[in-house]
Amino acid sequence: QMQLAESGGGLAQAGGSLRLSCAASGRPFTRFSMGWFRSAPGKERVIVAAISHTGEATYYPDTVKGRFTISRDNVKDMVYLQMNSLRPEDTAVYYCGAVLGGIHTVAQPYDYWGQGTQVTVSS
């Protein structure tokens, strides 16, 4: 089993920034690609960023491209999401996920999930 623990959520004003962190433990971190997803009330979990197991490849949907940056530290077993130019529509619970092998841009293939951290952006 892999354990994932998110931190760094909170309240931000529109145009502001937040940095989310996800600490991984329990399985060899470098075997897993990592993703950040978000879920707003009544909506499905959707991807906001993903990074390959080596960190060489990343993916962003158009909704966050140019504003969000995913990174990972394979020594500390950490993955990060830097969120800039936040908008009220970014308000959601953000989840860190781990998937064995390559990047996946939908939630179903992911093997492990954290508990989530709330991000609220006020206008």
Image (cartoon, helix red, strand yellow):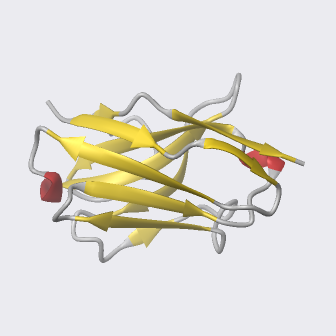
Image quadrant in which you'd find residue 58:
bottom left
Position of residue 53 relative to residue 26, above or below, is below
Residue shown at 20%/59% (left/top)?
A: 76
Residue shown at 74%/61% (left/top)?
A: 16
Q: Nearer the viewer, residue 114 or 48?
A: 114
Percent coordinates x, y for residue 78 in the rendering: 29, 55
Image quadrant in which you'd find residue 103:
bottom left
Percent coordinates x, y for residue 22 in the rendering: 36, 47
Q: Nearer the viewer, residue 65 or 3?
A: 3
Position of residue 99 relative to residue 54, above or below, is above
Count of number-bearing discs: 0
Residue shown at 66%/37% (left/top)?
A: 92
Position of residue 96 relative to residue 102, above or below, is above
Q: Is residue 64 left or right of residue 20?
A: right
Q: Nearer the viewer, residue 13 or 85?
A: 13
Residue shown at 46%/49% (left/top)?
A: 36
Q: Quadrant of the N terminus?
A: top left
Q: Is residue 77 left or right of residue 15?
A: left
Q: Is residue 44 left or right of residue 107?
A: right
Percent coordinates x, y for residue 116 in the rendering: 48, 32
Query: Outermost residue, right direction?
Result: 123
